[in-house]
Amino acid sequence: MFVLINANRSMFYGIVLAATLFIAGISCYFHQIRSYIDAYAISRAQQMFGSMPLAQEQEQLIKSIAVQMGAPDNIIMRRMNVSALRVFGYHNAFSYFPQVGGVLPISTIPFLFVSEGFFEDLTPEEQVFLIGHELAHIKERHVLFLMPCAFLGLFILLFMLFIMHKRIKAVVYACVAERYQRRSFVGVMILSIYLVSVASGMFCLAYRRHIERDADYKALEVLHSYDGCLKLLDRWQAEFKIPEHTTYFVGLMTDHPSCAERRVYCLALQNQYNQREIT
């Protein structure tokens, strides 16, 4: 017994020593590892969405707006490539944090990708609002941990469903004839898993609507770009045939507020600003 206790103690001390040495090694090379990860993340993001830099005057405009928004100064600005243009459109911009598989963030270096027609076709008011909107996303890191949190929530719900499966089975078996019990239980579990996945997706959509609304508010309150917001809404409705209003159930399945909602709070903030200026 004494020998066994000593052996276990030696094994425990060995594991602690190995873990300590591993952590110390990681700490010593942390900055080097971090630089490799950031370099990979930057290369991957540019490969996916575009690597062509903006013109100097365009970068200066974005940096001046970033100062007003309080956004970080390490934003990498690039033009969208053809693949990104097909997804995000010819008159658009979007913010991005590098991720693995579109799920796990691997770098906190933010990107701002700008479309081909952004500076050529949009009015200065539209440019200011849209840049401010995307810089708000970057400042607040809105999308950095969205997908990990969504997957974590889905995992927790599935784990709870697994814990409760015996109780669900008992209820199904008590309510269904013996010959249909097994099939009924399998059907209930499949339906439950589907409903859990739908709930997780609905949560993601609700959060996306929230962050889009929040980015609108911050851009409007800081930059007072009310005309730019209203002009963009008119442009999107004309070019993409976006309806002014959406029904309740359609609204639940979208990741942006409706044009009508955005127009309402834009005009409300504009009225508040004008009243403050008068007084």
Image (spheres, helix red, strand yellow):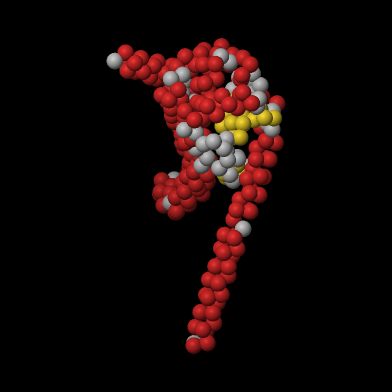
Which quadrant of the view contains residue 51?
top right
Decide if residue 86 is on the left or right side of residue 238.
right
Which quadrant of the view contains residue 121?
top right
- Residue 228: x and y in percent read 50, 16
- Residue 82: x and y in percent read 70, 26
User: Which residue: 48% across, 51% down?
Assistant: 159
Which quadrant of the view contains residue 240?
top right
Q: In the figure, 161 relative to 83: above or below?
A: below
User: Which residue: 52% across, 21% down?
Assistant: 128
Is residue 255 visible to us here? no
Closer to the camera in the image, 242 or 141: 141
Closer to the camera in the image, 86 or 177: 86
* Number of residue marks: 0
| Quadrant showing the C terminus | top left
Is residue 25 visible to us here? yes
Closer to the camera in the image, 253 or 93: 93
User: Which residue: 64% across, 43% down?
Assistant: 41
Closer to the camera in the image, 270 or 190: 270
Residue sitting at the far bottom: 2
Decide if residue 53 is on the left or right side of residue 135.
right
- Residue 108: x and y in percent read 55, 42
User: Which residue: 64% across, 18% down?
Assistant: 117
- Residue 230: x and y in percent read 48, 14
